[in-house]
Amino acid sequence: MTYPFSALLDGYRRLWPNRSLTTGPLDEQESQTLLYETIRQELRDEWTHPRVRQSSEVKFYYAVKRVAASDLPDGMKVALIQAYLTVMEQLQANHT
């Protein structure tokens, strides 16, 4: 089962409730852009002080672990992990 990006964004919000994300209505393209940008910021550890930032690989590991341990439906877990993989691959491609 495939999930629309708006549903994935809602799932992301459930996993990280303290993150302030846009609460207004978004179309699918805006939801995808916001989800990928938020994941990119998370993997780059942009919300942490520069002296204590962790690598993208470490952040990816913790994010996948949190998604897998969540109470989200299995299909949504897979879709969110796929979103993380997509963003991680983009980050890796930009660093080579």
Image: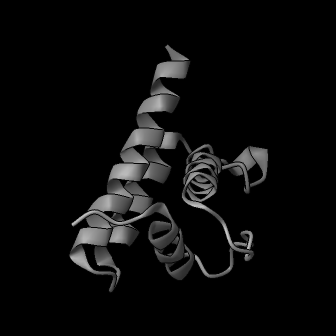
Q: Quadrant of residue 2?
A: bottom left
Residue at point 68% right, 79% down? 18
Looking at this view, is 29 or 53 the one in front?
29
Decide if residue 65 is on the left or right side of residue 26. left
Q: Is residue 89 above or below residue 36?
A: above
Residue at point 37% right, 44% down? 85
In the displayed orientation, state which residue is furthest to the front. Answer: 27
Q: Is residue 31 above or below residue 93?
A: below
Q: Position of residue 56 (x, y in %)?
A: 51, 41
Looking at this view, is 39 or 75 the one in front?
75
Number of marks in the rendered image: 0
Decide if residue 9 is on the left or right side of residue 67. right
Colouring scheme applied when the structure was drawn: one colour
In the displayed orientation, state which residue is furthest to the top. Answer: 96
Q: Quadrant of residue 69?
A: bottom left
Residue at point 59% right, 45% down? 40
Q: Position of residue 51 (x, y in %)?
A: 75, 45
Q: Position of residue 20 (x, y in %)?
A: 74, 73
| The N terminus, quarter of image | bottom left
Decide if residue 74 is on the left or right side of residue 87. left
Q: Is residue 96 above or below residue 27?
A: above
In the displayed orientation, state which residue is furthest to the bottom. Answer: 71
Residue at point 31% right, 70% down? 76
